Amino acid sequence: MGENGVALLNLPYKKIVGAEKEGDSECPRSQLDYVHRVTGERFPLRCKVNTCQFCGPRNAGLIAAAQARSEPRRMFLITDLPLDWQKIRHVMNQIREALADAGIRGEWAYSVEPNPSGNGKAHVHGLHHGDFIPQKLFSQIAKRNGAGSIVMIQEIRDLSSAARYGVKAAGAAFYGVKASKETYGAFKAFLDVNGKRIEHHSRGFYRLPSGKVVTQAEAVRAVISDRHPEDELKESENLWMVVSKGTSLELARRARMRALGTRFVKMPL
Ligand SMILES: [Zn+2]
C-alpha cells in the first residue's frame, strides 16, 4: 500500500514541498528530470523510495497530511512493544482481531517508533475511525496480546489541532518536517522498526474532506493537487516530459516527436 502511495508522487517536488535550502534540494538517486515542454523549466524527478535520504521524509510528510485530512475520530498510543516489526505486526493484528471480536468496528492507521530512551522497546502511535473503544477494554486487549497494559486513547475534539496531532501521532510528520542529514539516522531507525514502511493502515482508513473513502494513494494525490491545482492543470495539458539528466530540451522534443510519429511537424509553442 505504501509503495503504491509513493508511486504516485511524481509531480515536480519543489512545488510540493516548497523551497529547499541549497544542497538538500534534490533526490540524489534520481537520474531523471521533469522538463516543461514549452518553458524548458526543469525539476529533478524524485526516486520516491522510502529509504532515500531526500525522498523518504517527503513521502512521510505527504502521507501524514493525507492521514490528518481523513479526519480520524480518535488517537491512540500502545506501549511496551518489542523492537521488531514482525512481532509488532503480529501483536497489532491480534489486537485488531480482538477488538473486532468485541464488536468494535473501525479503521486505523499507525506507525511504530523506537522508544527515545533507547530501552530496546517501541511504541505505536495511531489514529482511529469508528466505534468508541473503552480504555479499560483496550488496555486488557493490548496486554493479553503482547503489548504493555498502558494504552491511551482519546477523542480528537479540535479539528485544527487534530490535523497537527494527526501528523505527529502517526509518527511520520516529524521526519517529514525536519528532514536533514542530522535527522536521517532517526528516520532510518523509524523505517527499520516499521518494516521499511512509513505507516500501516486498515482498508477504509483514508478519506477525502468530502468523507469519501479512498486509497492511500488517492488521498496523497488529493493532498498534492489541493495544494497545487496549477500542477494538475499542467499535468492534464501534458506539458511535462520526463527526460534523463543531461538531455537538453531540444533533444527531448525531437525524441518526443519521433515517438509520436510526427518528426516533421513543428512543435506547437
Ligand atoms: Zn530519492
Image: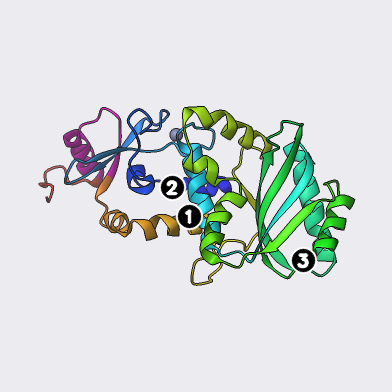
State how far apart marks 1 and 2 are (Cα): 8 Å
Front in this rendered view, residue 221 or 240: 221
Is label 2 in a helix, a strand or a loop? loop
Residue lying farthest to the right in this orientation: 144
* Residue 125 part of the magenta segment: no
| Residue type, numbered disc 2 | Leu
128 versus 151 height, above or below? below
Is label 3 in a helix, a strand or a loop? loop
Q: Is residue 15 left or right of residue 127?
A: left
Residue under label 2, please give it: 9
Q: Is there CB contact under 8 Å for labels 1 and 2?
A: yes
Residue under label 3, please give it: 133
The residue sitting at 27% across, 47% down in the picture is 240
The residue sitting at 44% across, 59% down in the picture is 222
The picture places residue 109, in percent across and down from the top left corner, at 64, 55
| Residue type, numbered disc 3 | Ile
Residue under label 1, please give it: 220
